Image (cartoon, helix red, strand yellow):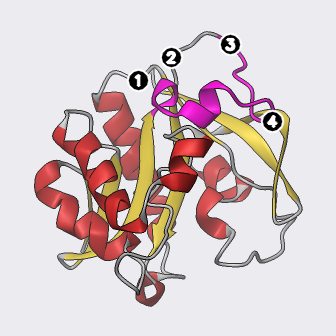
């Protein structure tokens, strides 16, 4: 059984089960690289990263959704207002295309033992439901076009255009951003 729920403060240990590095206190992303100014992200000690993401959940707007397989935390999707992502607000490679107050999907992470089972689609559907229930008029993502090939699991966090197209997203514009040498697209799904 697969369930997807907003990453509220009471579910944050489950977020940590998905995102925590093997070596506690080591540098990891914790989906902060887009939320914080680059200089702040680079200087934030690994031991403080988890607490910083937890604070978003405690302050009101959960920073994403968590997927569970038979009650076990299996995946994470970072989804929140684009305006809450410092790097997206100032990005020259992934520009805003209009003034719609969209929400953004910036990351999908699935624990290794749950990969290749279709969980990314469940996470994405959960992200759509969460954004819609929170009043988002549209949801954006910035995946790569894998060209029908496989991609490295270390680059898969942005998703693929095929995954997002299957979930009802449409390509809006090819960006100047790359991931693993592959072009990232700005894709959007209306939630109205």
Q: CA distance from mark 1 to mark 4?
A: 23 Å
Task: Answer whether labels 2 and 1 touch (C-beta < 8 Å).
Answer: yes
Comparing labels 2 and 4, the label whose residue is closer to the camera:
4
Number of numbered discs present? 4
Quarter the N terminus occupies: bottom left
On the rendered structure, is 81 left or right of 156? left
Q: Which residue is mark 1?
A: 136
Mark 3 lies on a secondary structure that is: loop
x, y percent for residue 67: 32, 65
First of labels 3, 1 by sequence position: 3
Graded by Cα atoms within 10 Å as few (under 14), some (14 to 19) or many (20 or more), the crowding at tag 4 reads: few
Graded by Cα atoms within 10 Å as few (under 14), some (14 to 19) or many (20 or more), the crowding at tag 2 reads: some
Mark 2 lies on a secondary structure that is: loop
Q: Name above or below for residue 110 compared with residue 176.
A: below
- Judge by depth and name the residue closer to the eye, 80 or 71: 80
Comparing labels 1 and 4, the label whose residue is closer to the camera:
4
x, y percent for residue 34: 56, 43
Q: Over which residues does the magenta segment extend?
A: 81-98
């Amino acid at each position: 059984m697969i369930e997807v729920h907003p990453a509220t403060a009471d579910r944050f240990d489950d977020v940590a089960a998905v995102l925590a590095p093997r070596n506690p206190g080591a540098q990891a992303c914790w989906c902060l690289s887009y939320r914080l100014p680059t200089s702040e992200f680079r200087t934030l000690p690994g031991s403080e990263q988890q607490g910083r993401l937890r604070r978003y959940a405690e302050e009101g707007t959960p920073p994403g959704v968590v997927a569970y397989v038979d009650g076990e935390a299996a995946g994470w999707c970072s989804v929140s207002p684009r305006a809450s992502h410092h790097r997206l607000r100032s990005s020259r490679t992934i520009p805003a295309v209009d003034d719609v107050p969209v929400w953004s999907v910036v990351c999908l992470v699935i624990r290794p033992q749950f990969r290749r089972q279709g969980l990314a689609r469940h996470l994405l559907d959960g992200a759509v439901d969460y954004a819609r229930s929170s009043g988002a008029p549209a949801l954006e993502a910035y995946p790569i076009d894998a060209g029908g090939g496989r991609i490295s699991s270390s680059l898969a966090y942005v998703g693929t255009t095929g995954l997002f197209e299957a979930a009802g997203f449409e390509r809006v514009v090819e960006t100047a951003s790359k991931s693993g040498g592959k072009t990232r697209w700005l894709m959007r799904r209306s939630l109205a």
